Image (cartoon, coloured by chain):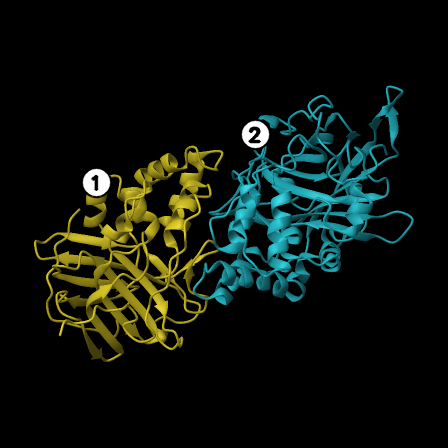
Chain colours: A cyan, B yellow
Amino acid sequence: MSHHFDTPTALKDPRINVCDLYLFAGRPGTTVMAMTVNPDAGISAPDTFHEEGLYAFRFDLDGDGREELTFKVRFGAVEHRDADEHLHTQSFEISRAVGHAASRGAEGELIVAGHTGEVAATGSDAMAFVGLAPDLFAGDAAALVVFRSALFKDNKFDPDAFQNRKNFFAKRNVTAIVVEVPNQLIGRGLVHGWATASLYGHAPEIQVSRWGLPLITNVFMPDADMKEQFNRSTPSDDQSRFIAQVGGVAERLAALAGSAVSPADYAKQMTARLFPTMLPYQVGTAAAFDFAGFNGRALTDDVMDVILTLATNTALGDGVVPDKDRTRDTFPYFGQPYTKAEQAGVLPARPGAREKW
Amino acid sequence: MTVRITPRRVLGTGAGVLTLGCALRSVSLAPARRQPELFVFRSPDESKLVCAVVVPAACSTHFDVRIHAGPKSWTVGGVRAVVPGAVTKCNDGAVFAGEVLGHSRAAAPRSTAVVIEGRPDLVRPGESLDVWAELRVKDGSRLRVGSPFVAALLAVDPAMSQRYHAASPAEDRGLFTEALAGRISAAAIGGGVADPGLHARRLVICLLPDVIRYRPDLPVGFSFASQNGRHPADDAMAVVETVLTGAVAPRAKSNRVRLTGGFPYFPQPIAAA
């Protein structure tokens, strides 16, 4: 659960729950940004996008925690494809906005448009794919629940919870928005990215989901209200609003684990690494989100192990890894989604969830 | 490589001595007990900067230690390991040289240590200090000590290790970039990285020159989050193995802190009556 179902809002409408963000090099001279929404799409969530949703890839180019560049994605009405009520299609448009327009609204210069389920391309070398995709996040969610309960309820460090070694997200799908653009549309050097989902339509724009680094809410924030606040805020707010919580959890874990001479000092080291919670990326380089550092995120990076290790200052992993067989070397880089046959026996991620949207 | 060291009287010199510790240990997990280690950390009351070179095989020790910290270097000559060490006051702090007990489960049970306690303002806030050390033994051979990362990679390659111990950090990138990248890449195969070669090239830039960096305005610790100095109780090898291989190593118990409350902080054997 990088950020799968991490707030009441996300549970209510998974179409606006940003699960993960990826940022990596594509074809030579291009960068790929991909976000996934609809955790457990097709089982606990739909495979469509909110028609009043505004999905955005935001980039801080000057280190101030605010976006100067945004790629915005909007969708049309859901239609049935091939007259099949089980197959959905939506039109989409992706726009690029800079300056003041980057932070608010849906305005921007159109760079690519298309329909879900198909690769769209333009003369500007931008490409996009939007549609059902395999969930490449791997994590033992059940173990994490046990670990968090031990910490937040019993004040105990329970690394043995991760001996469970079951990938809760195995054979599940999500919906992915994958955009590949020439590097000059982003810039040069070090950028910091994050993804958001907002509602923008009849009501004033309201951000409901934010993803800059993996597992921030699901590891460090037990309180549902704080998770909502985090999702509705911006990276420029992180230091003032959330660093105490995240640092406090790290200090507590280091103390319980006996993994730091000074747990308080370790918490400072860790929050310096994580805050503000944006994904750093050196444009034009190979991405890797690992123990050595964060430089974008590749589709198969095992972020769960990295965050668990950082949170506890111990070499801690959950024993599961992303399914590399569900990726490809060419656009859209996500492999085929899991079929119904392959998903036989997979239970809904949310018991009692609607299976038909 | 075997080092014979024989105790001598202390020759503390200079305006202060900084020593940073590292475990020379291979990725294939040669025991840390056989390798010198360097540490830099703050005294418990945070008023002093403490640096230590800890050399195992304390039964017979005879060495000179030179510590390089930025543009400065200090030499401490010889330590008697067969008798309790002595504390010597110098202009900017205190120097201890002598036998100490193992500071952690991973350390050798008895070692020889040179421990320096100096003023914390030896480096200005905002600036970083690059520290490394060299041991000169009686037969003329030289051991160099830097970060646990490089030490771990060198131990499986005697030829490269020999060249490393003869070189200085200024030469590291020219001499060892390709070889160390190869070692890192080999260590990462089967680990958690998609491209071991790329992983290696990315890491080796950060690891050379082989020094331990210390910034006084940042929290001290050799941790998974960052590496600033090194405290004897830091589980440095867990960090090294995980970062180099890209995979979580089987969970090992963390170091048990056994330092004392006062200088030289490393426990010393009780003298026979």
Give the residue drawn at x 25%, y 62%: B53
Give the residue drawn at x 67%, y 65%: A241
**For residue A287, what is the image quadrant?**
top right
What residue would you read off at disc 2? A324
Tag on residue A189? none
Which quarter of the rendering shows the N terminus of chain A? top right
Characterize the local packing of mark 2: few (<14), some (14-19) or many (20 or more) Cα atoms within 10 angstroms. Answer: some
Residue A213 in view in this figure: no
Q: Farthest residue toward the left? A: B139
Where A324 sits versus B226, above or below?
above
Give the residue drawn at x 12%, y 58%: B5
What residue would you read off at disc 1? B158
| Residue B34 percent across, percent down from the top left | 23, 51
**For residue A355, what is the image quadrant?**
top right
> Which chain hosts label 2?
A
Where B87 sits versus A228, above or below?
below
Give the residue drawn at x 9%, y 54%: B140
Q: Which amino acid type corresponds to the residue marked 1 in the rendered image?
A: Pro
Identify the element where label 1 is drawn: helix
Q: Which amino acid type corresponds to the residue marked 2 in the rendered image?
A: Lys
Which quarter of the rendering shows the C terminus of chain A? top right
Q: Nearer the viewer, residue B49 or A198?
A: B49
Characterize the local packing of mark 1: few (<14), some (14-19) or many (20 or more) Cα atoms within 10 angstroms. Answer: few
Residue A92 in view in this figure: yes
Where A314 sits versus B48, above or below?
above
Q: Nearer the viewer, residue B152 or A198?
A: B152
